[in-house]
Image (cartoon, coloured by chain):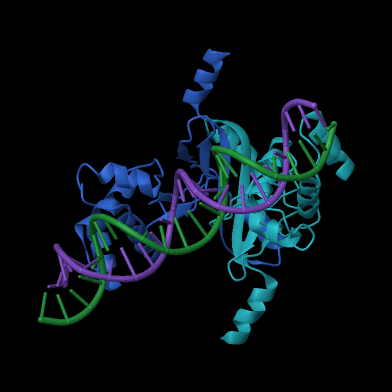
Chain colours: A blue, B cyan, C purple, D green
Amino acid sequence: MDICVTTLLRDKGFKVTPQRLAIYSALAATKAHPSAEMIYNELQPVYPTMSLATVYKTIEILKELNLVQVLNVGEDSFRYDADTTNHPHIRCMGCGRVDDLYGVDSSEFIKQVSSQTDYTLQGQQFYFYGMCPRCQKQTAAVS
Amino acid sequence: MDICVTTLLRDKGFKVTPQRLAIYSALAATKAHPSAEMIYNELQPVYPTMSLATVYKTIEILKELNLVQVLNVGEDSFRYDADTTNHPHIRCMGCGRVDDLYGVDSSEFIKQVSSQTDYTLQGQQFYFYGMCPRCQKQTAAVS
DNA sequence: CTCATTGCAAACTCTTTGCAATAGC
DNA sequence: GCTATTGCAAAGAGTTTGCAATGAG
């Protein structure tokens, strides 16, 4: 997988640096959809001198290479996902965690929209909001 | 409609001010899904002394009264919609305009997600991205 | 008359940019 | 060695907050 990133970077004329590999690896290894700061904090122990700016600059390149997609779940900051397939996301209103939603077929819905609008469709993002199992329990316990 | 806002504000113990009415009216009168700054600019001629801070504070209250919903179309700023029914939105990648998508039935899709996830669903936002008719023509003309 | 609200400015958060030092190739 | 990249600090954008003056009830 890192080989792949290395090749992709080189092919596009980008240099391969340990920072870039680390940032992509961190993203590819998690399902938590971290923000730039979360990635920065996670890499802090291993790369103590790395700056937030480098995280942002690298994400910019990864976007260009189609290695990450950007999520806008309604927070102040963006979140990033190394899984670039088109799948819906759900955010817990209690703890703020963001999960993937697999196993849902949106093609019928997209087809409907496509036939309804005079836009030419290029992509879509589906966000759901609710309570994750853990927060449901906590809420129940309080009341 | 303004009567309604007036009543709603009073009922919740908020004072009714010309600024608040103007901001809500501006939102209710447009389908452009303006950002706070767009609202501010639009009201500038009529309320030259009104500040951006007032726009933000008022939107906060309107959210509380369920008179507006917040959109996150992937820009740096939030956009607001006085139509609080649950409908998808589409953003033009060319000019940045945001339109409503009516006449699509998402209930089947939502039901699918609901049965697939162990979250309790509270809401959702569907964003589509593409090219509006006007931008399609311009792109065609250029190439 | 009282207290919420306004409008200004300053603060804050997230992200981007400029630039000298550094490190890929 | 050349040039892209890093890391720092400073700048920018969007939003929020503090506070004295104002205005709604």
| Residue A94 position within the rendered picture, expressed as x and y whole percent measured from the top left | 52, 29
| Residue B66 position within the rendered picture, expressed as x and y whole percent measured from the top left | 73, 38
Q: Which of A24 and A87 is in front in this view?
A: A24
- Residue A77: tell me if it is visible: yes
**In this rendering, position of residue A65 left or right of residue D23:** left
**Quick one: quadrant of the N terminus of chain A?**
bottom left
Q: Which of B17 and B69 is in front in this view?
A: B17
| Residue B140 position within the rendered picture, expressed as x and y whole percent measured from the top left | 61, 82
Residue visible at 76% across and 48% down in the picture: B83
Q: Nearer the viewer, residue D6 or B140?
A: D6
**In this rendering, position of residue B3 left or right of residue B106:** right
Number of marks in the image?
Answer: 0
Q: Which of B11 and D19 is in front in this view?
A: D19
A89 shown above or below C25 = above
Residue visible at 34% across and 61% down in the picture: A57
- Residue A1: tell me if it is visible: no
**In this rendering, position of residue B53 left or right of residue A100:** right
B31 shown above or below A37 = below
**Quick one: quadrant of the C terminus of chain A?**
top right
Residue visible at 54% across and 43% down in the picture: A104
B142 shown above or below C16 = below
| Residue C9 position within the rendered picture, expressed as x and y whole percent measured from the top left | 55, 52
Residue visible at 86% across and 39% down in the picture: B4
